[in-house]
Image: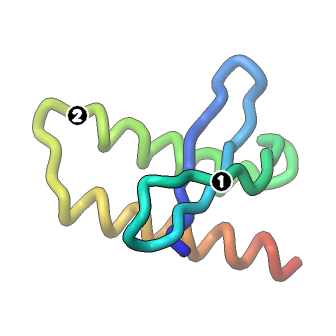
């Protein structure tokens, strides 16, 4: 499974979803309030900004996605 991250700015929440490899299906996992993990919130916000950049760089995007994955896994471990 690949984790996907999005931001709900109005509610200040991270939306976590997953997608089985080789499919177009996306399954909702959870919402995390900014107050529960401010560092992950800012990482996903940065990931979103990178994806919207007119100078999009896939290597930078993948590196930031790995940071988000790591922070989320740490969050789930706590």
Which of the two discs, 2 and 1, labels the residue nearer the N terminus?
Answer: 1
Q: Which residue in the protein does label 1 denote? A: 27
Mark number, residue 53: 2
Residue 76 image-quadrant placement: bottom right
Q: Which of 53/26 is in front?
A: 26
Rendered-image quadrant of the C terminus = bottom right
Q: Eyeballing the image, is 40 above or below 3?
A: above
Residue 31 drawn at (x, y percent): 79, 45
Name the colouring of the figure. rainbow
Label 1 neighbour load within 10 Å: few <14, some 14-19, many 20+:
few
Give the secondary structure at mark 2. Answer: loop
Residue 70 drawn at (x, y percent): 58, 76
Label 2 neighbour load within 10 Å: few <14, some 14-19, many 20+:
few
Q: Would residue 45 be found to the left or right of residue 72 on screen?
A: left
Q: Would residue 66 be found to the left or right of residue 41 on screen?
A: left
Residue occupying image coordinates x 69% and y 77%: 73
Residue 16 drawn at (x, y percent): 66, 52
Q: Residue furthest left?
A: 55
Residue occupying image coordinates x 66% and y 55%: 39
Mark number, residue 38: none
Residue 24 drawn at (x, y percent): 43, 54
Residue occupying image coordinates x 70% and y 50%: 28
Q: Eyeballing the image, is 7 above or below 75?
A: above
Q: Would residue 9 be found to the left or right of residue 25 on screen?
A: right
Alpha-carbon span between mark 2 and mark 1: 26 Å
Q: Eyeballing the image, is 64 above or below 69?
A: above
Residue occupying image coordinates x 58% and y 46%: 42
Residue 52 image-quadrant placement: top left
């Amino acid at each position: 499974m690949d984790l996907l991250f999005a931001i709900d700015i109005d509610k200040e929440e991270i939306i976590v979803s997953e997608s089985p490899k080789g499919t177009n299906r996306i399954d909702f996992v959870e919402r995390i309030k900014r107050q529960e993990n401010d560092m992950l919130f800012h990482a996903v916000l940065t990931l979103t900004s990178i994806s919207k950049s007119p100078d999009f760089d896939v290597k930078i995007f993948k590196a930031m996605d790995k940071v988000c994955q790591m922070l989320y896994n740490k969050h789930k471990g706590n």
